[in-house]
Structures are given as structure tokens and as C-alpha cells.
Amino acid sequence: MLVRYGLSISEFVKIAQKYDPMYIQYRDKSNNTDRIIENIKKLKSYTMTKIIINDFFELLPYCDGLHLGQDDIDKLQKKLKISKKQDLFKIIKKLHPDKIFGISTKTEQQILQANRFDIDYIGIGAYRDTTTKQVDSVLGERISYMAKISHHKTCAIGGVKLGDYIAHIDYLAICSGLLADF
């Protein structure tokens, strides 16, 4: 997103800080590990907001938390040779007790499964269609029901805009919506 809008990390942080974010998630699908670490360090130098890394379990020491998509949960489970997803989160929470852990969900079944995981929140979405990621289903107003069945804090993801209010949702993950007027 930063490349698309021609923003530096410091410029993005200045924009984000206007909205007093609880967390900033760092998602980088194009840089190598060294560059990602460098960018995380830069990000942390510009803000006191907690930084959550997307997908890269091995980079957890550089961040305050980890967010995993469903495919990434499966990959990490295989990499760590853990047979049950439920055990995966028990183990990583034990290894990193002070870190924040969240996962993406998009179905009722995934939310009910996540209710058994030792995690801090779930992302539910996509709420709306988005241009930052390919979306195979849009939940729309159904997201409120899905949030209601979660035992964890909930975060609306995908197409969320500033000013959205969604019943039973605790947090809004606002990505390109932060830059709508940029």
C-alpha cells in the first residue's frame, strides 16, 4: 500500500497516529527478510503503537505480535510439526507469553474452531470488497452475527472504512481507507 501511494514508513505513521491506533499491522509480501526487519525497526522507531507482523512467525522477536491467515496457520503447523491447530497456539503462546496473537477468519466454522485457540483476537472478513487483496467472499452485514459467536475480541478486516460502525466488532482494521483522501 505504501508503494502504491508513494509513502514512506514515517509518512504513513504520521497519518495513522491521527487516529490513535491500538495496533499497526505490518504486512509485506515483496521484500526479503532483512529488508522486512529493517522496516519493522524503522516503524518501531516512529511510534509507540504495538506492531503486529503478518505471517512471519520467525520475525516475532522484532514485533509485539503475530497475525496469521488460515493458510499460514497450516504452514506454521507443518513447519513446527504440531498435529493440532489448537496445540499450535498453546505452544506459541507459551514460547511468547507477552505477544499478541490473532488470526483471520471468514467462515462460521473457522470462528467456532478459533474459539478453542489461545489467541487474543480474530479478524473477520472481508467486510467489503477491497483492492489491497483478492477477496473470494464479502460478508457485509453478516459480519455482525459472526462476531457475536466469537469468544475472542473481533476485528473487521477487508474494505473497512473510517467511520464504520459494525455491531459486535471490537476493532476495525483500516488499510487503504486511511489514505482515501490522500
Image (spheres, grey):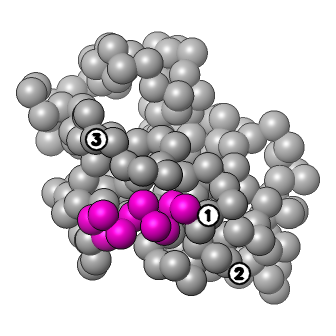
Marks 1 and 2, how far apart in space? 26 Å
Magenta stretch in the rendered image? 139-148
Would residue 95 be visible to someone looking at this image?
yes
* 137 w.r.t. 129: above or below: below
- Is residue 58 in sight in this rendering? no
What's the CA distance linking mark 3 and mark 2? 37 Å
Going 59% across and 28% down the picture, which residue do you hit? 50
Q: Is residue 160 left or right of residue 20?
A: left
Rendering quarter of residue 17: top left
Q: Name the residue rendered at 72%, 56% in the picture.
A: 119
What number is the disc on residue 150?
1
Identify the secondary structure beneath mark 1. loop
Estimate the x, y position of residue 26 in percent, counting from the top left.
45, 41
Closest to the observer, 82 or 109:
109
Q: Is residue 171 above or below residue 88?
A: above
- Which label number is shown at residue 78? 2
Residue bearing the label numbered 3 = 164
Query: Residue 16 placed where, x, y %?
Result: 34, 23
Expressed as whole percent of the image width and height from the top left, the position of residue 40 reads 51, 32
Which image quarter: residue 83?
bottom right
Q: Quadrant of the C terminus?
A: top left
**At numbered mark 3, what does the secondary structure look like: helix, strand or loop?**
loop
As measured in the structure, the alpha-carbon distance from the residue carrying label 1 to the one carrying label 3 is: 20 Å
Question: Which residue is pictured at 56% across the width and 40% down the height?
Answer: 52
Check the image and report above or below for 135 versus 165. below
**Magenta stretch holds residue 91:** no
Q: Amino acid at mark 3?
A: Asp
Residue 143 lies within the magenta run: yes
Which one is earlier in the sequence, the residue at label 1 or at label 2? Answer: 2
| Secondary element at tag 2 | helix
Q: Are marks 3 and 2 in contact (CB under 8 Å)?
A: no
Q: Residue at x 26, y 34 (%)?
A: 162
